[in-house]
Amino acid sequence: MLFLFSGLCALLWRPALWPAPPTVLAAPILQDDPKNEPLDTSAWQAWRGLPEEYKRKVDPRLLAELRGEIIPAHLGGDADSSTVPPAERKVLQKTRFLVYLRQTADLQTMLRESVFASALQQREAVFSTLAATAQQSQAGLRAELATQQQAGDVIGYQSFHIVNAIAVEGGLATLVDLARRYDVERIVANYPVVPLWTEPAAPEHSANAHNNEQSVVAAAPGDFDPQLNWNLALVGANRVWNELGVRGEGAVVAGFDTGVYFQHPSLINSYRGNNNGSLNHNYNWFEPDSKLYVNGDLGPSVSNAPTDCGALSSHGTHTMGTMVGASTSATGSAVG
């Protein structure tokens, strides 16, 4: 199995759901606290005069970010160190947020009333329905955002059609304007991505692996040590190889994580950009920047070659190894 990469060395954007499970949102959802609001701006005055039904559309975390109480995720705030001490707080003029539209695509009706010649045709119909719904329902909102961008009130915005939302970087005045719109359902903060759980250290050996040693060895004799690769038996990869004859040949997988150290001995030979030692990273690696693009074009890659920002985590290399790693000490589930 071949692979290509997409890097995420800086925390860029995560379309969060709101309200979301507390295990995902590490930072608490803050309550609106009028006594902490700046009093000397027309935007805050407009916010205080906003009817409650409109205020409820706005994630309270956004107000805390604008008051300087929390560092936004796109400015480096994370789950453990995003709260700003009172003495160091400065009012923030703009922050990032997701604007969810009220209208949603009626996929259930479309799927129930249609007959498709193939699974591919069905997927294309779902995609087209989502895209058409977003294009139609977002037209008025995009026009307003374009006007505000020209006036300098909005730094940037980018449309998404799967969830029918628009990512916006703007200030409180923009939040107030958008909250008043009937076509806007809710406005959500950009939360930092946090792990759902802490992974325990892998056992050196397990009874499950011992019971499956012979079948694992038969799947790829000489390729790996079953005592080190107990994970393959644990997920049944050896049965897929043996009973179905599927090992991942001809498939391409991509990773969207912290990046990948492509020169890792277990990965270099599976990298799609490696043609018998001649490396070509075009169309095989992409690291987006942190900007919002109106047309959805993410621009050129920030880096020219695959890298893993392993200062905090080498998780991207780890997960790619789980998929396609091929060596004695690290064999993925689909080695090809």
Image (cartoon, helix red, strand yellow):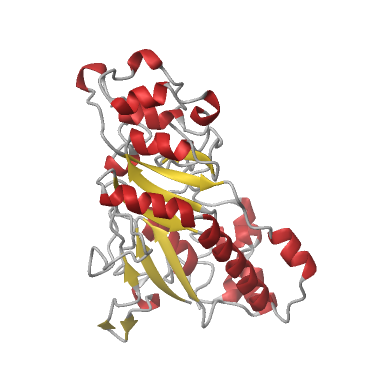
Q: Nearer the viewer, residue 316 or 284?
A: 284
Image point 27% across, 54% down: which residue?
309
Image point 51% across, 46% down: which residue?
100
Q: Nearer the viewer, residue 257 or 109?
A: 109
Q: Is residue 107 above or below residue 217?
A: above
Q: Is residue 276 above or below residue 37?
A: below
Image point 39% across, 16% down: which residue?
34
Q: Is residue 313 visible?
A: no
Q: Is residue 103 left or right of residue 146?
A: right
For this orientation, the residue located farthest to the bottom is: 276
Q: Is residue 157 left or right of residue 185?
A: left
Q: Measured from the top left, where is residue 78 in percent x and y? A: 34, 37
Q: Measured from the top left, where is residue 251 in percent x and y? A: 51, 78
Q: Is residue 256 above or below residue 16?
A: below
Q: Measured from the top left, where is residue 72 in percent x and y? A: 32, 37
- Would you identify the image quadrant in which residue 90 lies? top left
Q: Is residue 165 above or below residue 45?
A: below
Q: Nearer the viewer, residue 335 or 66?
A: 66
Image point 35% across, 59% down: which residue?
294
Count of marks overlaid on the render: 0
Q: Is residue 146 left or right of residue 242?
A: left
For this orientation, the residue located farthest to the top is: 35
- Would you identify the image quadrant in which residue 68 lies? top left
Q: Is residue 224 visible?
A: yes
Q: Measured from the top left, where is residue 212 in percent x and y? A: 64, 62
